[in-house]
């Protein structure tokens, strides 16, 4: 099991008049391990909301959950996850992912979404502001899938 150092709690449902959308600037992929990707964000009705982040989660290929929230699915198959700002570059699998350090020998199914984190009352509130965007990372070492 991969310890990622963060978690994405159940997200409160956001009901905007114009939903946010994210786009991968490098196109639909597939991408390679250690490739840098970044995002363009259309904030819709959330343009004035503070503390936007993009959550990216990658699962061993074939195990990506199809449910709309990241806490659903077989988390033991999660191979990489990050939570950075919308203007940041994302190094696929980063330099510290145990999966990448151990050879990155499997393809993965990934997804990304725009979130807002804010402190409210006695704790942090997490709100998913966009639909998921899906992409694949092809490992040159994975011979399971043609």
Image (cartoon, rainbow, N blue to C red):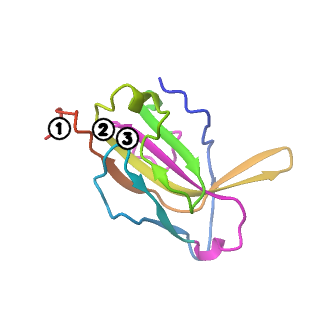
Between the C-alphas of marks 2 and 3, the distance is 7 Å
Residue 104, compared with residue 121, is above or below; it is above
Q: Mark 2 points at which residue?
A: 61
Between the C-alphas of marks 1 and 2, the distance is 9 Å
Q: Is residue 43 left or right of residue 138?
A: right
Q: Residue 65 in magenta?
A: yes
Depth check: give the residue in front, 66 or 22.
22
* Residues shaded magenta: 43-71
Mark 2 element type: loop
Q: Mark 1 points at which residue?
A: 145
| Residue at x 55% of width, y 71% of height | 19
Q: Is residue 26 left or right of residue 140?
A: right
Image x and y of residue 139, in percent: 27, 39
Image x and y of residue 112, in percent: 47, 53
Depth check: give the residue in front, 88 or 76.
88
Q: Name the residue under label 3.
A: 64
Mark 3 element type: loop
Between the C-alphas of marks 1 and 3, the distance is 15 Å
């Amino acid at each position: 099991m991969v310890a990622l150092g963060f978690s994405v709690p159940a997200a409160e449902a956001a009901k905007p008049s114009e939903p946010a959308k994210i786009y991968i600037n490098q196109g639909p992929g597939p991408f390679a391990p250690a490739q840098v990707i970044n995002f363009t964000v259309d904030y819709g009705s959330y343009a004035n909301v503070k503390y936007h982040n993009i959550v990216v989660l990658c699962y061993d290929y074939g195990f990506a959950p199809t449910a709309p929230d990241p806490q659903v699915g077989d988390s033991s198959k999660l191979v990489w996850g990050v939570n950075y700002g919308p203007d940041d570059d994302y190094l696929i699998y980063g330099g510290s992912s145990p999966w990448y350090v151990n050879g990155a020998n499997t393809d993965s199914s990934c997804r990304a979404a725009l979130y807002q984190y804010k402190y409210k009352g006695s704790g942090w509130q997490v709100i998913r502001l966009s639909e998921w965007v899906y992409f694949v990372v092809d490992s040159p070492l994975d011979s399971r899938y043609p």
